[in-house]
Amino acid sequence: MPVNEMTSKEVTKKIFNKEALFILDVRNESDFQDWKIEGENFTHLNVPYFELLDGVEDILEKIPTDKDILVVCAKEGSSILIADMLSEKGVTVSYLKGGMKAWSEHLEPVKVGDLKDGGEIYQFVRIGKGCLSYMVVSKGEAAIIDATRMTDIYLEFANGIGANITHVFDTHLHADHISGGRLIAEKTNATYWLPPKDATEVTYDYQPLEGGNDVAIGNTTINIHALYSPGHTIGSTSFVVDEKFLLSGDILFIDSIGRPDLAGLAEDWVRDLRETLYTRYKELSLELVVLPAHFMIIEELNADGTVSEKLGTLFAKNHGLNIEDENEFRKLVTENLPPQPNAYQEIRETNMGKINPDEEKQREMEIGPNRCAVR
């Protein structure tokens, strides 16, 4: 039987379409438990590669005959070998091209909606890492918000729709992934915006992003209003786009709220976080569509693959927005935290420009799940 190659894009399509997939993950158990490919109708079997070197006979009865089979490993090589062994036993099987490293880096552009004067907004879903970035387009100009380090996809996408990138924003200094904002700005001569309170240690030039900034994209009335919203970081800044969308960065998610501890200042920033969520956001229109910088669980994806929800719905359903007792809120966001992101201090220093790891090192630094939210 032939061994097929399945790309991260093809797996993403199965997630969006809620298709069934059986995944044989041959990484070590600890790596599998920490981070795996998740889909609503995906099932998993984790058997470390070294346990299968003498043959796959013991697992054949555990492999279904009515689903697509995908073998996954860290970089690809081990999965090809195991897929070959299964194929020799008559199993129709695929391996994940590029392994979990490729899965971590895949970006899927999805249109979120239209803007008033003919513009559009797109969400770039980093499906394996939970990162979300955005492109606002109007009259041949584009702004990018919270770009990942995989900069080519933004440049190619903008080129494909005939738009020039004129502005690049980061809502805050990221700690879980390396920003591509500065590099995109350098390649396109765009203006790079960063909240100054997060930028006290950066080593490069930037345009200070502060509450009250209005930035026009194209020659339309599409404006991006900066809304100072500290809590996840001291400089965290939200955007209201076209009076329709709220880009909330890592302050508010669909199913959770941002964690305040990634600069070691959880106790100091709890009050800021609460004030942003319970006071500043309460003053906004409940009809705004919240577009966060991350998602936590696959169930947060909408039917079209986007991650979004009206602010009013989140005030009704998101537990993090409905804790009346301030002490209970403080306890939630300081004690109920997942492990901190892999290499987050190095990632922060990279985003400050203090260190410049090579590409392979950057990939290693980012491996693992998104951990920006309170559980």
Image: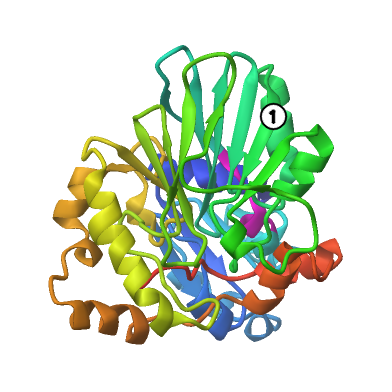
| Depicted 202 relative to depicted 181: above or below | below
Toward the viewer: 181 or 357?
181
Residue 153 in view here: yes
| Depicted 306 relative to depicted 159: above or below | below
- The answer to whether 134 appears left or right of 258 in the picture is right
Q: What are the residue bounds of the magenta stretch?
A: 102-108
Q: How crowded is mark 1: few (under 14 residues within 10 Å), some or many (20 or more)?
A: many
Toward the viewer: 95 or 158?
158
Residue 103 among those drawn in magenta? yes
**Total marks placed:** 1
What residue is drawn where x is 83% and y is 61%? 359
The quarter holding residue 207 reads top right
- The answer to whether 44 appears left or right of 79 in the picture is left
Residue 298 among those drawn in magenta? no
- Residue 339 image point, x, y percent: 48, 82
- Residue 265 image point, x, y percent: 48, 81
The residue that label 1 is drawn on is: 166
Where, quadrant-wise, is the C terminus in this rendering?
Answer: bottom left
- Residue 259 image point, x, y percent: 41, 72
